Amino acid sequence: MPFRPLSSRDVRWAHAEGEGLEHLHLAATPTGVVARSALIGGQGDRPYGVFYEIELDTAWRVTRFGIETALGQRLALKQEASGRWTGEDGTHRADLDGCIDIDLAGTPFTNTLPIRRLDGRLDEPTELRMLYVPFDTFEPLVDEQRYTELAPGLYRYEAVDGGFSADLPVDRDGLVIDYPTLFRRV
């Protein structure tokens, strides 16, 4: 399914179970897309408030992202070359080499990144090394994930270890409409 060029827009998701809400603002820029979002929710019995900003180039590759909790815990990384990440201090994060896309816990938006970046190339199951950031520790790690386009506007996300999978319907911008058991668009 070819996606349309992105126009600036706002999107909201609610947690499917429990309390939680995300408000995302996407802005098309001459050099790509900037995503800014505020989330409130919880992981287990730990509530969180998180703000994030992701800068993408015109091919939907992450060039920089930063996340911060309402309490001030923070992480910012920059992708200087494809799959090569550095911290704010310029230190190379060799442990994250090979990760092109990111997956931030607590938001369905980061599923859009590989779906848009690989538009038209997910007709076969495609395994990806993702830079995953859990909201409880903010310690990035590598997570192996698989994406497959099942039909126009419908993608399967799978954890390579077999621990989880979900079929994700997306809109004409590649944004998740419903993430079974986790999020729903409001």
Image (cartoon, rainbow, N blue to C red):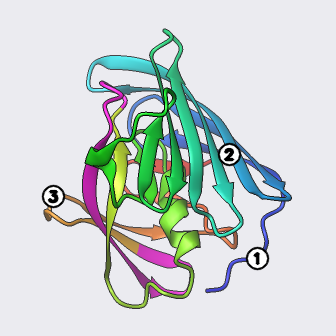
Q: Main secondary structure of the magenta part?
A: strand
Residue at 53% x, 13% y is 70
Residue at the spot of label 2: 35
Front residue (pair 108, 77): 77
Give, as a three-letter code, the residue at label 2: Ala
x, y (%) of residue 97?
33, 55
Which mark sits nearer the N-terminus, 3 or 2? 2
Which one is closest to the eye, mark 1 or mark 2? 2
Location of mark 1 (residue): 4
Measure how far apart labels 3 and 2 are at the Cα level. 29 Å
Mark 1 crowdedness (10 Å alpha carbons): few <14, some 14-19, many ≥20: few
Residue 56 placement (x, y as % from top left): 65, 55
Q: Nearer the viewer, mark 3 or mark 2?
A: 2
Work out how far the residue at label 1 is from the one at label 2, CA to CA, in angstroms: 17 Å
Q: How crowded is mark 3: few (under 14 residues within 10 Å), some or many (20 or more)?
A: few
Relative horizontal placement of residue 24, taking residue 91 as reference (left or right): right
Which stretch did the figure color magenta?
135-155
Q: What residue type is labelled 1?
A: Arg
Is 166 above or below relative to 124? Answer: above
> Residue 135 or 177: which is nearer the viewer?
135
Q: Is residue 6 left or right of residue 121?
A: right
Q: In this view, does 128 lie above or below 131?
A: below
Q: Is mark 2 on a helix, strand or loop?
A: strand
Reading the image, the residue beneath label 3 is: 163
Camera-side residue: 153 or 36?
36
**Amino acid at pointer 3:** Gly
In this picture, is 18 found above or below 35?
above
The residue depicted at 86 percent of the width and 59 percent of the height is: 30
Left of 165 or right of it: where is 86?
right
Left or right, 149 with reference to 58: left
Could you say whether the residue bearing mark 3 is in a helix, strand or loop?
Answer: loop
